[in-house]
Amino acid sequence: MDLATVDKLLTTTRSVRKRLDFDRPVPPEIIQECLEIAVQAPTGSNEQGWRWLVVTDREKRRAIGDYYRQAFMLYARSRAENPPNYDPDDPRQSQSGRVAASALYLAENMHRAPVLIIPCIQGRVEHTGLVVRQASLYGSILPAAWSLMLALRARGLGAAWTTLHLMFEKQVAELLDIPDDFTQAALLPVAYFKGKDFKPARRIPARELTYWDSWGTRRD
């Protein structure tokens, strides 16, 4: 295994927003190929309860985009009223303006993505307080959705991990005939990306966020 290639894939798979090529068609066979890779991810009790809703219909994409835009505006208003308080040297502080601009761009253009993918998992957790059930349910779909993004990235396609449409989960479920006993986990706009490559993001170093044997205990 070429570790350099694997490490590059893992460190440069971004949530792509402004660099999505909305005008270039995406062959359905490539989407299907990536989904076959995605379902090799872990699945609780081997239930394989995942489902993938691939939306290419123009009007349905437009409707989902409308819901997403409404949700984003609600989120942005709340964020403006309660802004995060980062230290000046926190990398999130210097990135916040650029991230906000790209997020707004995506909200205004979500419907233009040639493919929207909604990963779903069988089951609901909102009526139970059991953390183990919540972890098991989402742990059976989120790894597969991330594997899908990695597979897309390796083939020159970008995606953005979004969840704001879940403010209108019932409306989207009705639009797409999603059964009541399935949970939508994310909304991935998918398109070929513009430009040649991506760089690793500036993150808080993992060593500052990692404890050993006891909470708050770091290695030297």
Image: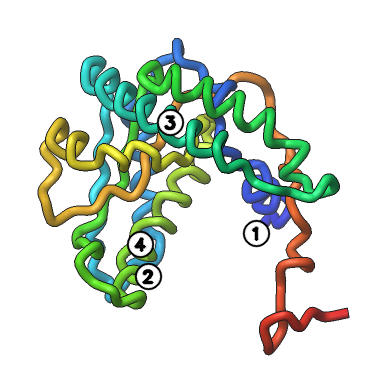
Return the residue at label 1: 1
Query: Contact (CB < 8 A) between labels 1 and 4?
Result: no
Q: Earlier in the sequence, mark 3 or mark 4?
A: 3
Query: Contact (CB < 8 A) between labels 2 and 4?
Result: yes
Q: Secondary structure at mark 1?
A: loop
Return the residue at label 3: 72
- Mark 1 or mark 2, whichever is nearer to me: 2
Q: Which of 78/99 is in front?
A: 78
Instruction: Give amino acid for label 1.
Output: Met
| Side of 119 where 85 appears, left or right | right
> Whole-percent x and y of residue 65?
33, 23
Instruction: Give amino acid for label 2.
Output: Ala
Q: CA distance from mark 3 to mark 2?
A: 26 Å
> Whole-percent x and y of residue 127?
20, 66
> Whole-percent x and y of residue 212?
72, 83
Q: CA distance from mark 2 to mark 4?
A: 5 Å
Q: Secondary structure at mark 2?
A: helix
Q: CA distance from mark 1 to mark 4?
A: 29 Å
Return the residue at label 2: 135
Residue under the point 60% across and 39% down: 14
